[in-house]
Amino acid sequence: MTRPITAAEELLANTSAPFAEARAMPKSVYTSPEFLAQELEHIFSKDWLCAGRADALPNPGDYLTMEIAGEPLIVLRDRDGVLRAMSNVCRHRMSVLLQGRGNVRAIVCPYHAWTYSLDGSLRGAPAMAANEGFCKTDVALPQVRCEEWLGWILVTLNPEAADPAVTLAGVERLVGKFGMQNYVEAFREEFRWNTNWKVLAENFMESYHLPVCHAETIGHTVDLMKMTCPEGEAAFNYHYIIKNDALDLTLAHPTNTVLEGDDRRTTWLLSIYPSLLITLSPGYFWYLCLTPDGPDHVNVLYGGGLAPEFVADPKAPEHFARLKALLDEVNAEDKDCVEQVYRGITSKLGAPGHLSHLERPNFDFATWVSKRVNGG
């Protein structure tokens, strides 16, 4: 008896066609719990994931928490100003230690008050002196790789993962002149949507939907014929749009003396695999960091801010307020769109259609996912 084809095999067949003949990914890769388990094992457990912007943790003791493939982690700035990532699980009875964001002088377990220094070493363990087999200096929170790259905090469980500065050197070649590391974050929020993580990632990767899905907000700032969607690189894909003058925040500030010509009005959309999605314009940036929460939900870290010239402008508070209001509206529009897509994916009559030339990044993403889950 012939066994059923798996979602990974369906995707491999789907991405084996040349781009000119490509269709959207098979429905099974969005709905299959088995496929999600493969993604967690072969993608999220092995690649660099984003914890947000480095300027979110400016002071010693500032921390945030995150989870990678079920592994609770702490990311913090230690007393020497170094960014660190470590296990968020106590070495005693395995309680989770910290939640959310904040500032601490030490990491104290909420269960039995075992206390760790900001480097993860055990500083105190109440009522443990009578245990002859216990040695405080032998206990520490396991460290996890953590790197700052162009202002972003990147974390991985994989000790063998290539340095992001190497794998993402192409990003610096493309947008290095923008000085992304100098942009200032104005807000950072988290939410959960009823869609598969790849649906939201793909939504970001194509601007084909902007004139329709975002007709009330940014749709009028773009022209489909002024979108360029080249073939992506091994660790990311991208496209860019030359904007009109409809929204000043998408353009270079008059005091910006670095960007010239079309660079002063070009918005870049960078999709860093697997799930850091960055919109970078001469005036502002915003981003999404995605982690799957079952096949049908995605947890989203959402943030954004302004280029340094807009931050230095006397009207900076007004600029920040306008940006946040705009991006919240854009997000609301995207939420409606991507949740409707997921509803369609779960239908019986729905089927993947042909891709537009404006969806080249989506094809590159599907190919990358397929290689990872299929062992390539």
Image (tube, rainbow, N blue to C red):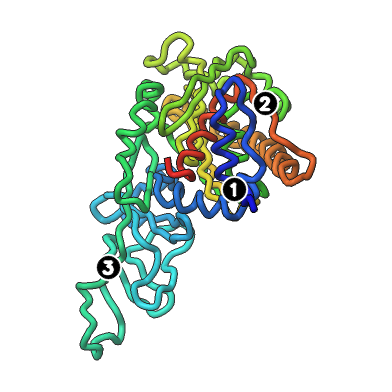
From the viewer's perspective, is residue 5 above or below residue 241? below
Of tags 3 and 1, the one toward the viewer is 1
Q: How far apart are marks 3 and 1 (CA)?
A: 42 Å
Front-most of 82 and 346?
A: 346
Q: Distance between the residues labelled 1 and 2?
A: 22 Å
Residue 334, x across and y down, in percent: 66, 37
Q: Residues within 10 Å of mark 1 (few under 14, many from 20)?
A: some
Mark 2 belongs to which amino acid?
A: His
The tag earlier along the polypeptide, 3 or 1, is 1
Residue 321, x across and y down, in percent: 58, 35
The dot on residue 6 is: 1
Secondary structure type for disc 1: loop
Q: Quadrant of the C terminus?
A: top left
Secondary structure type for disc 3: loop
Identify which residue is drawn at 49% across, 52% down. 40
| In the image, farthest residue toward the right | 349
Q: Is residue 137 visible?
A: yes
Q: Name the residue under label 2.
A: 354
